[in-house]
């Protein structure tokens, strides 16, 4: 992509190199990103894309001579770490408010000033600052954003958050900081589909400059205007989105293959000549030998990208595949599935969608009998053989070689037309070459382990595949290969995934988990479902606006707004009510102890009653002010 000479350059990499031992991740990389560009970096697993991102963000050093990593001065850079760092004693809300943003500092100053109401000047200054920055509603906005990313327990300590929740919290804080240049490493990991779509809309905003590693192909298609491919240590640059990338990459590979064919012919001629020469060679002969060696290195360094083709012969499915009869499952008051009946047909491809925590994984485990139903029954066909790929069930023998891990399951698997495929051949089709097959499992990357785990499942020759988040940590080439395989798979496929592109390409209809145990069968792909859902949301907003306009028209007299002092009182009341409620909860915990004396019971009872009265009085006053507002 030709650089605009008038563009404001945010990032300039010159001769950037990174090695680990003898392995060269990338060498002499040059890259310029200007204001407003949205650039994605794609590569096969283990190619060094995350390392290049850390170098670009300035959190890891480059190597080599004449290397320069230049980030524009006075440009706010936001980097999404894979393992974000927080103060474990902070609450979720406090951690979010740590965002590097002047408005957040003003909110914190105001919060501190409220603790010392006698310091009138400090309180007045904090409130003036909030007015200047229009930050009075900021806390509400922060809570709204936290809710979008399913972080609804604002007072929960960061220390007890899961890794996925911390990643989402880091993303929230990054959005709140409003950086001008975002550097993101796999931002869609640990997000459900609603969160991913929100993030896509945010990153598409024109004021955001972006460099990210992602394998989300809808991001590449809808957000990006340049795609960088890191391949064998070199960067290939493609202007445009994912469609442009596919077209231009195909043309590049075609040109490489034409050049490779020419080099091979020339190499064969050189090889003939080298073999005819005596051991004692002239300077001219040595020059020919050097030429041969250069060509040999060039030809062996270029490879033709192949898709693995897997014509596995699956076990025959019977007339009865899998049936659910009035199946229900709950955990206490939390309903996962309620009165679901369904009969799977042979060769169905079903996608499962719904927010995190509504029971998708529980549902899969019920199908395989890992979790028992509360009511109803699951009937499995006599010929049905499950292959269950779990998102957290990759349990591989780390001390075994790749080939041994596969051969422990089977030496061969049946193909169509009576043929057989050896374990080594199947590994090659899954992009494990003969050298990689001798590597210990412990040395594989996360994506390679997932690929091996999937292969181990296929070696058992199932006819009903259940895949729970199979796309995590897989590069685009592997995703394409997996998609093509699933489209040809001679059996049923049931998939949970947050990869919208993958879902659209593979499945025929959806099970939509709507919460409270309700599961709806939607006849269509994910994009169809989302378009209908969005239109429904737009209709609801139109109706809501119409209702609001109607309510305004019915108002006979305009109610006065809050004065400055009343707004100050309202904010103070909110803080006081929260503290009283926390105090009441502490006293209630003490009151519930089993070893209390009679005097202590009387004391705690009176204290709870007094606190309740105080809360009620302050809530009544707050409601009066709210009516005025």
Image (cartoon, rainbow, N blue to C red):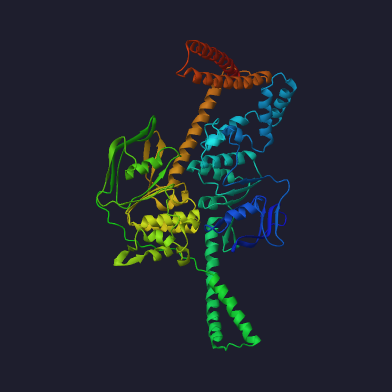
At horizontal 50% and vertical 43% (from top left) the residue drawn is 191
Q: Which x, y percent locates residue 96?
A: 60, 35
Q: Locate residue 58 relative to residue 150 in the image: left or right.
A: right
Q: Quadrant of the C terminus?
A: top right
Q: Nearer the viewer, residue 476 or 576?
A: 576
Which of the 4 quarters of the picture holds residue 18? bottom right
Q: Quadrant of the N terminus?
A: bottom right
At horizontal 43% and vertical 65% (from top left) the residue drawn is 428
The outermost residue toward the right is: 121
Q: Is residue 397 above or below residue 586?
A: below
Q: Which x, y percent locates residue 217?
A: 51, 52
At horizontal 51% and vertical 27% (from top left) the residue drawn is 547
Q: Nearer the viewer, residue 491 or 552?
A: 491
Q: Which x, y percent locates residue 165?
A: 52, 39
Q: Locate residue 148 relative to residue 97 in the image: left or right.
A: left
Callout count = 0
Residue 385 in sight in this render: yes
Q: Which x, y percent locates residue 500?
A: 47, 48
Residue 240 in sight in this render: no
Q: Locate residue 257 relative to residue 371 in the image: left or right.
A: right
Q: Nearer the viewer, residue 309 or 581?
A: 581
Which of the 4 quarters of the picture holds residue 168? top right
């Amino acid at each position: 992509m030709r650089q605009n000479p008038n563009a404001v350059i945010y990032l300039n990499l010159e001769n950037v190199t990174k090695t680990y031992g003898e392995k060269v991740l990338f060498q002499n990389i040059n890259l310029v990103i200007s204001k407003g560009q949205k650039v994605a970096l794609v590569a096969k697993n283990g190619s060094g894309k995350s390392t290049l991102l850390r170098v670009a963000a300035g959190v890891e050093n480059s190597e080599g001579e004449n290397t320069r990593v230049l980030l524009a001065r006075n440009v706010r850079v936001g980097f999404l770490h894979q393992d974000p760092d927080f103060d474990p004693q902070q609450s979720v809300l406090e951690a979010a408010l740590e965002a590097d943003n002047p408005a957040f500092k003003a909110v914190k100053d105001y919060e501190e000033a409220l603790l010392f109401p006698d310091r009138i000047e400090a309180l007045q200054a904090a409130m003036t600052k909030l007015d200047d920055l229009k930050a009075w509603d900021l806390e509400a906005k922060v809570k709204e954003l936290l809710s979008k990313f399913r972080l609804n327990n604002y007072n929960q300590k960061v220390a007890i958050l899961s890794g996925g929740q911390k990643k989402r919290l880091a993303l929230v804080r990054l959005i709140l900081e409003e950086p001008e240049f975002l550097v993101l490493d796999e931002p869609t990991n640990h997000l459900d589909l609603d969160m991913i779509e929100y993030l896509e809309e945010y990153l598409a905003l024109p004021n955001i400059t972006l460099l990210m590693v992602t394998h989300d192909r809808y991001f590449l298609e809808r957000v990006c205007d340049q795609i960088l491919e890191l391949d064998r240590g070199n960067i290939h640059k493609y202007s445009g989105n994912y469609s442009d990338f596919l077209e231009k990459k195909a043309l590049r590979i075609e040109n490489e293959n034409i050049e490779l064919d020419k080099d091979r012919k020339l190499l064969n001629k050189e090889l003939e000549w080298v073999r005819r020469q005596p051991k004692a060679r002239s300077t001219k002969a040595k020059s020919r030998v050097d030429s041969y060696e250069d060509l040999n290195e060039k030809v062996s360094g270029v490879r033709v990208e192949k898709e693995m083709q897997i014509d596995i012969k699956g076990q025959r499915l019977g007339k009865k595949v899998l049936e659910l009869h009035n199946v229900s499952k709950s955990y206490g008051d939390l309903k996962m599935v309620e009165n679901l009946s369904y009969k799977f047909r042979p060769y169905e491809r079903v996608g499962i969608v719904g927010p995190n925590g509504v029971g998708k994984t529980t549902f899969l485990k019920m199908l395989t009998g890992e979790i028992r139903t509360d009511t109803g029954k699951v009937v499995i066909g006599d010929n049905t053989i499950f292959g269950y790929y779990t998102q957290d069930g990759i349990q591989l023998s780390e001390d075994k070689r790749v080939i041994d891990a596969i051969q422990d399951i089977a030496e061969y698997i049946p193909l169509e037309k009576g043929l057989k495929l050896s374990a080594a051949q199947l590994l090659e089709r899954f992009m494990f070459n003969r050298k990689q097959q001798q590597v210990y499992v412990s040395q594989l990357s996360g994506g390679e382990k997932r690929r091996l785990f999937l292969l181990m499942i296929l070696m058992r020759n199932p006819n009903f595949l259940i895949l729970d988040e199979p796309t995590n940590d897989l590069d685009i080439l592997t995703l394409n290969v997996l998609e093509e395989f699933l489209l040809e798979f001679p059996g049923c496929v049931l998939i949970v995934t947050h990869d919208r592109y993958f879902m659209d390409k593979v499945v025929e209809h959806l099970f939509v988990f709507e919460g409270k145990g309700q599961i709806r069968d939607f006849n269509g792909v994910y994009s169809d479902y989302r378009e209908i859902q969005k239109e429904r949301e737009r209709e609801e907003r139109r109706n809501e606006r119409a209702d609001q306009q109607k309510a305004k028209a019915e108002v006979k007299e305009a109610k006065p707004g809050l004065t400055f002092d009343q707004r100050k009182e309202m904010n103070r009341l909110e803080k006081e009510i929260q503290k009283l409620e926390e105090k009441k909860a502490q006293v209630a915990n003490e009151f519930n102890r089993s070893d209390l004396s009679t005097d202590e019971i009387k004391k705690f009872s009176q204290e709870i009653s007094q606190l309740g009265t105080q809360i009620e009085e302050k809530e009544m006053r707050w409601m009066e002010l709210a009516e005025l507002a």
